[in-house]
Image: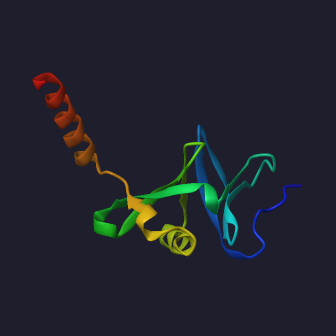
Amino acid sequence: MIQSLNTKVDLVIDATAFTGLTDYGKVMVGDKGFEFYNSRDSRKFIQIPWEEVDYVIASVLLKGKWIPRYAIQTKKNGAYTFSSKEPKTVLRAVSKYVDPSHMVRSLGFFDVVKRALQSRFKKSSS
């Protein structure tokens, strides 16, 4: 059995983790970290202590009305992407433990295209 990081749990909600293949399970937000547990395979879990969280990145669409997914960028192990039934509730629970300046919006489609074009023209002109 897996030992949880948390001593006090703020939120448990159904979620999906996008780790190569899609894993369905539950997200747990508590006082020591962010955890994801797979509902089918107990060996598949993700535990991220709050000290390891660098950024929380939310994909925001329709001017904040819909958040399809969010990612947690760690200091050493890259980003983990999740979606849940109520992402705003999850992000509010996470905001208690993560500095607000480290909770950011992801770039939109046109922002990515704009950056790609700008970097392309900067390379060719110099």
- Image quarter (top left, top right, bottom left or bottom right) of the N terminus: bottom right
Q: Is residue 9 left or right of residue 105?
A: right
Tell me residue 14's x, y (percent).
64, 64
Using residue 46 as the reference point, say whether residue 90 is left or right of it. Answer: left
Q: Nearer the viewer, residue 6 or 51?
A: 51
Number of marks present in the image shown: 0
State the residue at coordinates (23%, 40%): 115
Q: Position of residue 7 (x, y in %)?
A: 78, 73
Question: Quick one: 77 or 21, which is closer to the camera?
Answer: 77
What color scheme is it? rainbow
Q: Residue at x 74, y 76 (%)?
A: 8
Which residue is located at x 70 percent, y 67 percent?
A: 32
Residue 24: x, y in percent? 65, 52
Residue at the front extreme of this rendering: 126
Q: Quadrant of the C terminus?
A: top left
In the rendered image, the vertical position of residue 23 relative to residue 99, given as above or below: above
Up-down: is 119 above or below 90?
above
Spot occupied by residue 120 in the image (x, y as percentages of width and height): 19, 29
**Name of the residue lying farthest toward the left:** 125
Identified at 18% across, 34% down, the residue is 117
